[in-house]
């Protein structure tokens, strides 16, 4: 007689310990349908669940855009769709939300989420494009302009939380940083082309880096020894350069890493060029009396928005603009630390 061992039921896939090897294993909240309680705990702790995005200053955006049912509104940076969800609800019944974004990875996911909310299908129009081309899109989709316009210039949490996109130094990944991974050179490719003066200027102009020349020299010296093609490799070099400085500063090495990553990301995606083009054509895309709200997250963006609005006010293009920058409430900053650098400015078309 032979021994027969009954088939054992398959073991369930378990969450991998306290020190998982892979990013997708580490953050259970990237699967909210399975780990709803964990997502709730992450939010309750004042953090943003990985792979998602918490829209910033939603009440303030709705207040200054003053949207009414039946209006046509555009979200120029759709992202995860948090603002878009609120805007789409506000224009009902009979209104329309136009939504654009340049990211081909996240855009289809966000559109699917929005369409799954039960709004009339004709009330949402989504297009993948950079907002630098806003004028042509408005001309074809909303002749005469929109009633209200929102642009959130921040990097979305989905991009930050995915190491494969190369935006974060908190986990290793390719040094990419492209909003559209199929378009243009990656950050690693761009970095390999700079000389010291060019890189120093980039760090200063794009991130107000106080040690731009020192960091540029150190980064390119390391680049000559071995290509800096991963996020962790670049971050390690920046930390090493900073730790070698005798200069006293309240900044930590990681503060410098953030600024270097910001400067490269802006260059890779030509963010300032796109923003300047967007701001120049923005007034022609909004109806007289239409409202505009722009969220920025660092001084280079905010300076451009502030200047464009002030110039527009003096030229009579705008009838009114925000007298001062608007910041998130202390409560929001505590609940969502990623909101702490946000600055909101608004304008009304003349």
Image: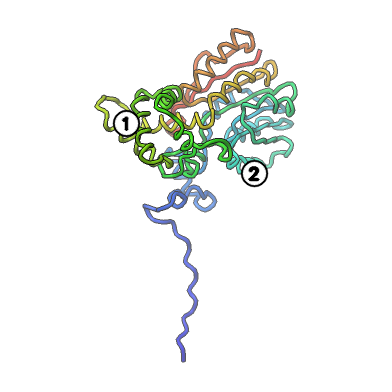
**In the shown orientation, is residue 141 left or right of residue 169?**
right
Label 2 crowd bin: few (<14), some (14–19), many (20+), radius 10 Å: few
* Res 198 → quadrant: top left
Q: Residue at x 29, y 25 (%)?
A: 249
x and y percentages locating residue 347 in the rendered image: 59, 17
Given contact means CB atoms under 8 Å apart, are the residues at marks 2 and 1 in contact?
Answer: no
**Residue 331 seen in this snapshot:** no
Q: Residue at x 31, y 32 (%)?
A: 241
Q: Residue at x 63, y 8 (%)?
A: 316
**In the shown orientation, is residue 270 left or right of residue 283?**
left
Secondary structure under the numbered disc 2 in the rendered image: helix
Query: Vertically, is 325 above or below 181?
Result: above
- Label of residue 327 in the image: none
* Res 98 → quadrant: top right
**In the shown orientation, is residue 231 left or right of residue 59?**
left
Judged from this view, the residue extending furthest toward the bottom is 1
* Residue labelled with disc 2: 112
x and y percentages locating residue 169 in the rendered image: 41, 39
* Res 238 → quadrant: top left
Q: Residue at x 30, y 26 (%)?
A: 250
Mark 2 vs mark 1: give the one in front.
1
Q: How far apart in space, not on screen, are marks 2 and 1 (Cα)?
A: 41 Å
x and y percentages locating residue 91 in the rendered image: 68, 30
Between residues 134 and 150, which one lies in front from this camera angle? Answer: 134
Between residues 223 and 307, which one lies in front from this camera angle? Answer: 223
**Residue 268 seen in this snapshot:** yes
Between discs 2 and 1, the one toward the N terminus: 2
x and y percentages locating residue 175 in the rendered image: 46, 40
Query: Vertically, is 170 above or below 196?
Result: below
Secondary structure under the numbered disc 1 in the rendered image: loop
- Label of residue 252 in the image: 1
Give the position of the C terminus as an image quadrant: top right
């Amino acid at each position: 007689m032979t021994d027969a061992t009954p088939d054992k039921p398959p073991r369930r896939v378990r969450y991998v310990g306290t020190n998982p090897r892979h990013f997708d294993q580490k953050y259970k909240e990237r699967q909210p349908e399975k780990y709803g309680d964990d997502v709730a705990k992450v939010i309750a702790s004042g953090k943003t669940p990985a792979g998602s995005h918490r829209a910033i200053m939603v009440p303030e955006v709705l207040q200054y855009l003053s949207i009414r049912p039946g209006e046509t509104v555009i979200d120029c940076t759709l992202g995860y769709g948090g603002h878009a969800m609120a805007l789409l609800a506000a224009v009902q019944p009979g209104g329309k939300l136009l939504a654009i974004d340049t990211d081909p990875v996240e855009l289809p996911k966000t559109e699917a989420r929005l369409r799954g909310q039960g709004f009339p299908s004709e009330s949402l129009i989504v297009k993948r494009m950079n907002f630098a081309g806003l004028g042509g899109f408005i001309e074809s989709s909303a002749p005469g302009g929109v009633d209200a316009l929102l642009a959130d210039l921040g990097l979305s949490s989905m991009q930050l939380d995915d190491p494969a996109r190369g935006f974060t130094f908190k986990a290793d990944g390719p040094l990419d940083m492209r909003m559209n991974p199929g378009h243009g050179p990656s950050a690693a490719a761009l970095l390999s082309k700079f000389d010291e003066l060019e890189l120093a200027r980039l760090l200063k102009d794009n991130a107000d880096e106080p040690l731009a020349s020192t960091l540029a020299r150190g980064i390119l010296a390391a680049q000559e020894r071995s290509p800096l093609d991963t996020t962790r490799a670049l971050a390690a070099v920046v930390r090493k350069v900073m730790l070698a400085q005798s200069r006293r500063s309240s900044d930590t090495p990681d503060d410098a890493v953030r600024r270097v990553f910001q400067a490269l990301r802006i260059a890779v995606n030509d963010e300032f060029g796109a923003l300047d083009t967007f701001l120049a054509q923005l007034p022609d895309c909004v109806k007289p009396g239409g409202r505009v709200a722009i969220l920025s997250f660092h001084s280079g963006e905010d300076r451009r928005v502030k200047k464009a609005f002030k110039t527009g006010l003096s030229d009579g293009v705008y009838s009114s603009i925000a007298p001062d920058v608007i910041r998130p409430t202390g409560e929001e900053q505590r609940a969502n630390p990623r909101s702490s650098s946000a600055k909101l400015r608004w304008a009304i078309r003349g």
